[in-house]
Amino acid sequence: EAGVAQSPRYKIIEKRQSVAFWCNPISGHATLYWYQQILGQGPKLLIQFQNNGVVDDSQLPKDRFSAERLKGVDSTLKIQPAKLEDSAVYLCASSLDREQFHYEQYFGPGTRLTVT
Amino acid sequence: SQQGEEDPQALSIQEGENATMNCSYKTSINNLQWYRQNSGRGLVHLILIRSNEREKHSGRLRVTLDTSKKSSSLLITASRAADTASYFCATDSQGGSEKLVFGKGTKLTVNP
């Protein structure tokens, strides 16, 4: 079974530029998550989708971050404009179906973003 | 905000020894999960324990949950150098959005 795919793996941009990350979850997984992990900390949930609907985006800085999940499969996370404090690893995860009590999350390798 | 807090922040042991990591949390939970993260890589799910369970085993892993103390422990027996990683507890809280909230992790080093 293929895992969660993410691209790019690394990205370096200057502040005020924009950047987009892509995630392809495990086939058949209804729930998709984007996390931000700052060095030395645990992952922080940015947004959670159930199929193509948003379940939780309470910690997403909506003035600069946006995310969408087209047709309930792939997802993109965008930052525009980027700030220095956005430097982090962005992790995508998926789970089979949270509403059916499948809670284990499967993580992709992440995208390491450096904002200079 | 962090829900789970792991203790210790860092742990260094010799191969073959046991490693114990603890996690404390603040609010009532549906379940608690442990994840491992190797350097520079994504997280891997290790084990899930539900709020009505007290102990669970998976291979060399043993997890306990004490809901009265709002704490959990992860025991790795007969550790190997390959167990070197950061270990995170994550809680799935009752009520609210029930999102998974991770702690800051315990960095485990197993010396050969």
Image (cartoon, rainbow, N blue to C red):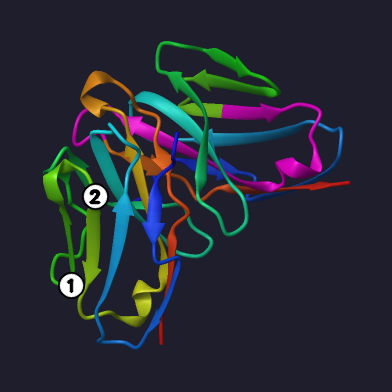
Q: Is residue B34 above or below residue B13?
A: above
Q: Is A61 in front, or is B20?
A: A61
Q: Position of residue B12 (x, y in %)?
A: 78, 48
Instruction: Check residue B91 for magenta coloring.
Output: yes
Residue bearing the label numbered 1: A64
Residue at 29% across, 46% down:
A33
Return the chain for callout 2: A
Q: Is residue B65 above or below residue A61?
A: above
Instruction: Check residue A81 for magenta coloring.
Output: no
Q: Position of residue B6 (x, y in %)?
A: 55, 42
Q: Amino acid at mark 1?
A: Arg
**Snapshot quadrant of residue B78:** top right
Q: Which residues are magenta?
A: B73-98
Residue bearing the label numbered 2: A74
Q: Is A72 left or right of B78, judged from the image as shown?
A: left
Q: Is B22 left or right of B3, judged from the image as shown?
A: right
Query: In front of the other: label 1 or label 2?
Result: 2
Return the chain for callout 1: A
Q: Amino acid at mark 2?
A: Asp
Residue at 87% across, 33% down:
B16
Tell me if mark 1 has few (under 14), some (14-19) or many (20+) residues whose alpha carbon lies within 10 angstroms of its own.
few
Q: Is residue A32 above or below residue B73?
A: below
